[in-house]
Image: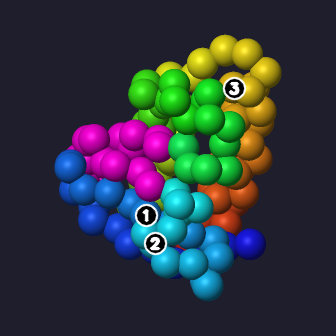
Amino acid sequence: MGCSVAHIELKSGGHIITNYDPAKKLSDSSSIKLPITSFIDNELLVLKVVLNDHFVKSVRDSDEYLQEIIQFKKVDQSHTKIISSMIGWGSGSDWDNTYNFFVKGNEYTYKALLKKYK
């Protein structure tokens, strides 16, 4: 599993749009759309998480505060520590399922990133 289609406009007010199905267009409802609310080069990336149709409607309708905050901390000349925090979760079993989806998905994504840049 890897991101097959992506478009990134890396700036405050930009966005990241991805889809794991190479047969789909980025405009497809299954695409993942992440508006960039804040970006400081080599320091901070804040993404507004917009849930797609993979998630139940009740969660999609109440995701207005869901965000991922990614901090980049320089360790030394060749290493950077990445700290990813997701905030804005709702409560209830549907939100628990959404949380568990992101635990697995984010773990996969960051492990893939580590493999690519080791």
Q: Tell me, what colour scheme is on the image?
A: rainbow
Assess whether mark 1 and mark 2 are in contact (beta carbons under 8 angstroms). yes
Task: Give the amino acid at mark 3.
Answer: Trp
Q: Which residue is mark 2?
A: 26
- Sequence-wise, the earlier of marks 1 and 3 is 1
Task: State the residue at coordinates (47%, 43%).
Answer: 50
Q: Which residue appears farthest toward the bottom when viewing the image? A: 23
Region of the chain picked out in magenta, as a range = 33-50
Q: Position of residue 36 (x, y in %)?
A: 31, 48
Task: State the residue at coordinates (27%, 65%).
Answer: 9
Q: Is residue 107 left or right of residue 34?
A: right
Q: Which residue is mark 1?
A: 17
Task: State the residue at coordinates (74%, 27%).
Answer: 94
Element assignment for label 2: loop
The N terminus appears in which quarter of the rendering?
bottom right
Q: Is residue 67 visible?
A: yes
Q: Which residue is mark 3?
A: 95
Q: Which residue appears farthest toward the front when viewing the image? A: 57
Q: Label 2 neighbourhood size at 10 Å, few (<14), some (14-19), many (20+)?
A: some
The question of residue 29 being in magenta is answered with no
Task: Give the amino acid at mark 2.
Answer: Leu
Q: Is residue 7 left or right of residue 21?
A: left
From the image, give the main secondary structure of the stretch colored magenta: strand
Residue 91 is drawn in which quadrant? top right
Compare residues 48 and 116 and report the one nearer the observer.
48
Q: Position of residue 48 (x, y in %)?
A: 40, 40
Task: State the residue at coordinates (62%, 28%).
Answer: 58
